[in-house]
Image (cartoon, grey):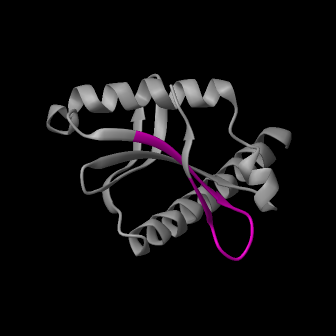
Amino acid sequence: MTASRSASDRRHSEKRGRRAELAALWFLRLKGYELVARRFSTPVGEIDLVVRRGELLVFVEVKRRTSKVAALDALGATQRARIARAAALFLQRRPSLCSMACRFDLVAIGGFLPVHVEDAWRL
C-alpha cells in the first residue's frame, strides 16, 4: 500500500510540476522570451525550460512550493551542478546556439504571481 501511495504521490507531483512549468513559460513569454526547449532531459540532468530573448539564451529551473520563500530556497548546489551539466550537453547538441550569451534563471511559484530571478546562479 505504501508503494502504491508513493506512485500516486509522484504522479500528482509530476502533474503539479508540469502545470508550474507551463505557468512559468507563459509568464516568461509575457516578458518577451521565446521557447527553445521544454523538459530537456539528459542522463546528467534535466532543464525545465530553455528560452531566449534576442541573443541571450536562458536555462530556467522552475520551483513550485507552498510559498515563494520556500520555492526560492528549493534550489540546492547539487541540483545547480546537474542543470549546468545538462546545459553543456544542450549546447553540444545545438551548436548554432553556442555563440549566444547564457544565463541560469529561477522561476519560483508559490503565490499568485511567479517570481523571476534572473541570473540566479553562475558556474
Q: In which quarter of the image is residue 87?
A: top left
Left or right, residue 88 beside residue 108: left
- Which quarter of the rendered picture does the N terminus lie within? top right
* Residue, far right: 2
Residue 110, x across and y down, in percent: 74, 64
Q: Position of residue 111 (x, y in %)?
A: 74, 71
Residue 76 drawn above or below residue 33: above
Query: Which quadrant of the view contains residue 6?
Result: top right
Nearer the observer, 40 or 4: 40
Q: What residue sits 70% from the left and 32% below the top? A: 76
Residue 53 in magenta stretch = no
Expressed as whole percent of the image width and height from the top left, the position of residue 84 reads: 47, 28
Q: In this view, does 90 lie to the left or right of 47?
A: left
User: For this view, does 51 lie left or right of residue 7?
Assistant: left
Camera-side residue: 96 or 102? 102
Along the horizontal axis of the image, is 67 left or right of 24? right
What is the tally of numbered marks visible in this picture?
0
Check if residue 104 falls in the magenta segment: yes
Q: Which quadrant holds residue 33? A: bottom left
Residue depicted at 80% across the width and 55% down the height? 69
Q: In this view, does 59 lie above or below 32?
A: above
Q: Is the magenta stretch mostly helix, strand or loop?
A: strand
**Is 73 in front, or is 16?**
73
- Tell me if residue 78 comes above or below residue 19 in the rendering: above
Residue range of the region highlighted in magenta in the rendering: 103-117
Query: Residue shown at 45%/71% (left/top)?
Result: 26
Determine whether 24 is above or below 70 in the image: below
Residue 99: give x, y in percent of width and height.
20, 35
Residue shown at the point (24%, 50%) measured from the top left: 55
